[in-house]
Amino acid sequence: MVAQNLRLAIRGLSVVFTRRRGGSVTAVENLSLGVREEEFVSIVGPSGCGKSTLLRIVAGLIRPTSGEVMLDDRPVEGPGADRGMVFQSYTLFPWLTVQGNVEFGLRLRGRPPEERREIAHRYLDLVGLRGTEPAYPKELSGGMQQRVAIARAMANEPAILLMDEPFGALDAQTRSVMQELLLRVWEQTHKTVLFVTHDIDEAILLSDRIYVMTTRPGRIKTEVAVTLPRPREVSVMDTPEFIALRQRVHGLIREETLRVLGLESRDHL
Amino acid sequence: MKRDRPGLLARLSEVLRPHEPISRSAYLAGVGASAVGIFALWAILTYGGLVAPLFLPSPSDIVRAAAALIADGSLAEHTWASVNVIVTGWVLAVLLAVPLGILMGTLKFVEALLEPVVNFVRYLPVSAMIPLLILYIGIGTPQKVAVIFIGTFFQLILLIADVSANVPKDLLDSAYTLGARRSDVFGRVLLPATLPGVMDNLRITMGWAWTYLIVAELVAANRGLGYMILDASRGLFTDRIFVGLFTIGLLGFGFDATFKRLHRLLLPWSPKI
């Protein structure tokens, strides 16, 4: 990793939550990672490993206990429009139309109406939702709402897009279509993305690199480079290279899951 | 083989399935049956001479009493006086309770400031505070408005606080990651996000405000529906008591329908409609 093209650099990050009744939990411990410009990086790990916490720290929504987060060589001090985020839960503003939702960030920055409309149309086009502008979120399916949420985050043209299990609440069929859509969007935009998921196939299909996290306290266990050629199609999932990667990542996460359950190896099962 | 139309029992069992929708005609039949049933029972009890008019006047007695009260203009005057007191007290309560409630549900520090006080006052009977109110603000209209205010404000503030505490945190976090500052979040996220819940609670507390009417018009009133009922009961004019009750019921019905309509009209995006 060449230091100067790092869009996002996290060094020596630790997060300790103090419990109400005393005592403390170390959610993330001495974690370091980097994301290059135009790179799609995923973080996978067993549940409760602190991967969502990590993403919220990058977004500036949680303060780390120690360590630093640098975006384009400037320290992250709080939330900002340069780090767009897509959440697992449905977070469209129900009182705004699709158009109003996508324009939300642009409006905050005082962009003129014609420009807002033009940008909103461009990103709704990108996620295949032109024509839904006047609809309210309650009229959209879950998958459509998440597409609008992606368009809303991208319309702000953030330096990095943070995605916290954005398809986690969708049914299996919709999820796979959404993965395909995100793959196509990425091939067109080459947006820098930090993506959190527990879906191994999703991580391999979409990413250039995958960080596998350990169980709590969360650290980086290994980094896996996804060498599958781009542009990718969903059919790549049937190739021997993909299957080998899947087995490797699966094995790594399984080790961690067994540790959570207090089983050091499968002999105990 | 000839098939008969479904019998009454079969049709009854059809509309009595838990949580299942029923046809519009079946629903209207229920509404009609309830109205006709109550009216029929009332007519039998009164015209049949089973209950003395002193306790329950007949429908025609009440219509006659209502006509007299309408003719001399007193019903309109009493109604107007009561609506005035109730709407004024309720509007004052809303103007204060909505912003305070939103802050209380959002900021833990405001909750610490307000919640213990509100929960203490909320349990005090409004009627027990009347002597104090007379001492502080006299026996005029302000005293009556104050009764309505006290009766609704302390309930409403807690309801609104609950609504704003339930605004999903991810909604606020989304706004932050789109570039919103803390000052933007109140007006652009919290306020609109609470509107459907606020609207529901406005409707509910307006109903509660009417239930305080008698308490409000207990002291030194010379008009108002509450006064009219109290006055009629002193002379045992049962028919006039019923005219007062019917008027209050109809007004409540009207206010409720108006709120529901406004909700649909003003908040077409609301997930509650």
Image (tube, coloured by chain):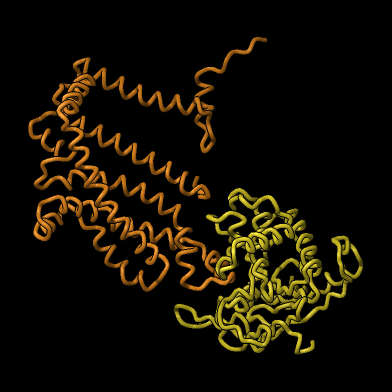
Q: Residue at x 53, y 31 (%)?
A: B22
Say which of A123 and A127 sits in front: A123
Q: Quadrant of the C terminus of chain A?
A: bottom right
Q: Which residue: 67% across, 54% down? A: A144
B160 relative to B52, above or below: below
Question: For chain B, what colour was chosen?
Answer: orange
The answer to whether residue B146 shows anywhere in this view is yes
Q: Is residue B100 left or right of residue A241?
A: left
Residue drawn where x is 10% and y is 47% of the image: B219
Relative to the observer, which residue lies in front, A115 or A25?
A115
Residue A259 screen position, x and y as percent = 69, 77
Task: Tell me where residue B231 appears, x and y as whole percent.
Answer: 10, 36
Chain A shade? yellow
Residue A249 position within the rendered picture, expressed as x and y whole percent measured from the top left: 80, 73
Where is residue B54? Give x, y as percent.
Answer: 13, 25
Is residue A168 visible to us here? Answer: no
